[in-house]
Amino acid sequence: MSTVEQQEIYLLRSRINRLEAQVDQLYRHLGISFVEDTASYDPRVVAALRSGNMIEAIKYYREAQDVGLAEAKLAVEDIRKKLGL
């Protein structure tokens, strides 16, 4: 994968993260709950989060999604928040 393609993917993932944050904010503003389906997450990530092991969860997320450390950390923090852990 070329550097340009990697940059485009990074920018798209960043935009998705921002859009998800905006949707979350709208849900809070409107007082609407969204129940997250845990089946959509890697079960290893969820299990690690439930046991309080953030580093392990990030490691599993990186393996499954083939992303960098910073992006995985943000994603796992988001999953933890959505699951209320």
Image (spheres, grey):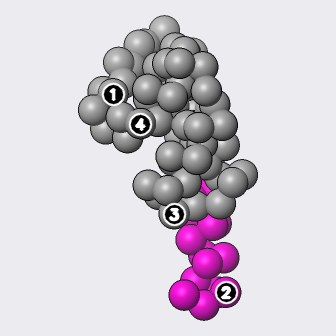
Residue displayed at 43% across by 26% down:
47
Neighbour class for label 2 at 10 Å: few (<14), some, many (≥20)?
few
- Mark 2 lies on a secondary structure that is helix
Residue 75 place in picture, x, y as percent: 58, 42
Residue 22 place in picture, x, y as percent: 58, 35
Residue displayed at 69% across by 54% down:
69
Q: Amino acid at mark 3?
A: Asp
Dot 3 or dot 2: first in sequence order is 2
Residue 29 place in picture, x, y as percent: 57, 15
Residue 31 place in picture, x, y as percent: 48, 9
Magenta stretch: dominant SS? helix
For disc 2, the marked residue is: 3
- Mark 4 lies on a secondary structure that is helix
For disc 3, the marked residue is: 66
Kindly indicate whether the residue at mark 1 contacts the one at mark 4 (C-beta within 8 angstroms).
no
Disc 3 to disc 2, C-alpha distance? 16 Å
- Mark 1 lies on a secondary structure that is helix
Disc 2 to disc 1, C-alpha distance? 33 Å
64 on left or right of 71:
left
**Residue 76, quarter of picture:** top right
Farthest residue to the top: give it.
31
Q: Nearer the viewer, residue 53 or 79?
A: 53
Q: Which quadrant of the rendered structure holds the N terminus?
A: bottom right
Residue 74 in sight: no
**Residue 67, quarter of picture:** bottom right
Disc 4 to disc 1, C-alpha distance? 11 Å
Segment tinted magenta in the rendering: 1-18
Whether the magenta-drawn stretch holds residue 10 is answered as yes
For disc 1, the marked residue is: 38
For disc 4, the marked residue is: 44
